[in-house]
Image (cartoon, rainbow, N blue to C red):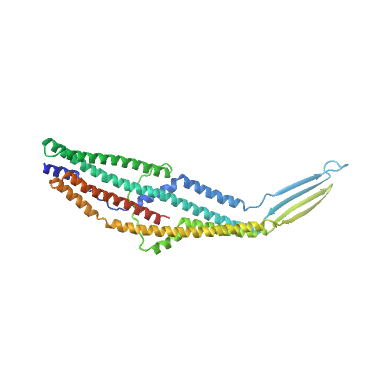
Amino acid sequence: MIRKIYTCLLAGISILTFTATAGASGINDLFSEIERNNGELKALREEGRATVLESSSENTLDATSIEYSPFFKRGADGVASSELIVTQEFDFPTLYAARAKATDAIRMVSDEEYAAARRTLLLEAGGLYLDLVKNRRMAGLLSRRLDIADSLTGVWERGVKDGTATMLDLNRIRMDAMQLRTSLLDNESERVRLEGELRVLNGNKPFVAEGVDYPDFSLPESAAQLTELWLSADPDIKAGAAQFILSQQEERVARQGWLPKLTVGYRRNTEMEEASNGFVVGASFPLFTTGKKVRAAVAKKRAADLRLETIRQRSESQLTARYEEARALLRTISAYDRRLMDETVSLLTKSVMLGQTSITDYYTEVQTIKEREETYQDLLNRYNRLLLQITVF
């Protein structure tokens, strides 16, 4: 009977060993699809384009004014005299240049805010992707455990019939198989949920990738090296910097608000058969509004500067915390001896097949290894999430 158990289990057992493969192509494919298909990002692109066009449209000449005044008097047939005035009002020329630079700054703000929103969505999608990797790994692990339980069930059922095994041991194996089937159903539900959320982010289009696995990320050796790169590439910092540049340019525009609006035009007056032609030249001075506009622009610039400094400090603090946590997790992950766990399961399996270990003791020992394996998968997922947050810009 023991030899039968040994033979059947060797046929059904395949120790699950995960190796980290380079899944960067899979997650990069996902990122490309999200950026191409996500409706929110499409809307942000259009909103940015509209904002720039609105700013540009405000930096044009005002409407041309045409006035015609006919005059009548007693004793004269029809129009006795008339006046035609055609005028064009425009701002002081330097204001147009200042506003054009402000429009460029608005375009920069739009681009950087889009990049920040894009990164947020990619991190969300990347987190779902990493959870899907873990889900698939756990599905493989559970399936292989279930294969072992099913093989044990078949062998112990025959053992109960011929009196070489107990019903208590058979029920213990059946309970384990039942739990594994339930876990697999939960795992499948989780997979459907993750793929559904990815589909929503992907513009309601399914994401299909070959060999979904953890990306081949690498943690930089020093925090200083990472910080220098981060502070120059973080979309939130760049968006804050763009807002500050825009506030500077808006202050320059406001400070030129005291410059007069100029008016030029043509004027024609007629009196019976005679007509006279001339030019219209004028200017208007905004004496009572410039001061408040300048103070408001200065306050906006100060607020943008303070906000940028806050973003930098928060971003650097978060980066340092994530880097240190990732290093700690990497040390913990490295302490796990996967080969030892696999070899221990093999030895326990051999021991129970030879009758040296009871089914109860076997499951007690294997359960400990299962828990360690699941903890290992949790740590691996957390580690890759941290690296995702550190490396995606």
Residue lying furthest right in this view?
Answer: 75
- Residue 123 point in image, percent of width and height: 41, 51
Is residue 347 positioned above or below 176 on the image?
Answer: below
Q: Decide which of 120, 359 is in the foreground and name it.
A: 359
| Residue 189 seen from this side | yes
Q: What's the residue at 53%, 50% (across, down)?
A: 48
15 versus 233 height, above or below: above
393 vs 54, left or right, is left
Residue 315, given in percent of the width and then of the height, sits at 45, 58
Of residue 72 and residue 276, the one placed in the foreground of this image is: 72
Left or right of residue 121, residue 303 in this image: right
Residue situated in front as seen by the camera: 278 or 211: 211
The quarter of the displayed image where residue 217 is located: bottom left
Q: Looking at the image, which residue is at 56% across and 51% down? A: 52
Quadrant location of the N terminus? top left
Screen quadrant of the C terminus: bottom left
- Looking at the image, residue 204 sits to the left or right of residue 173; the answer is right
- Asked whether the viewer can see residue 101, the reply is no
Is residue 278 positioned above or below 153 on the image? below
* Residue 220 in which image quadrant: bottom left
Percent from the top left, x then y, of residue 200?
Answer: 42, 42
Instruction: Where is residue 98? Give x, y as percent.
Output: 61, 58
What's the residue at 28%, 49% (across, down)?
A: 374
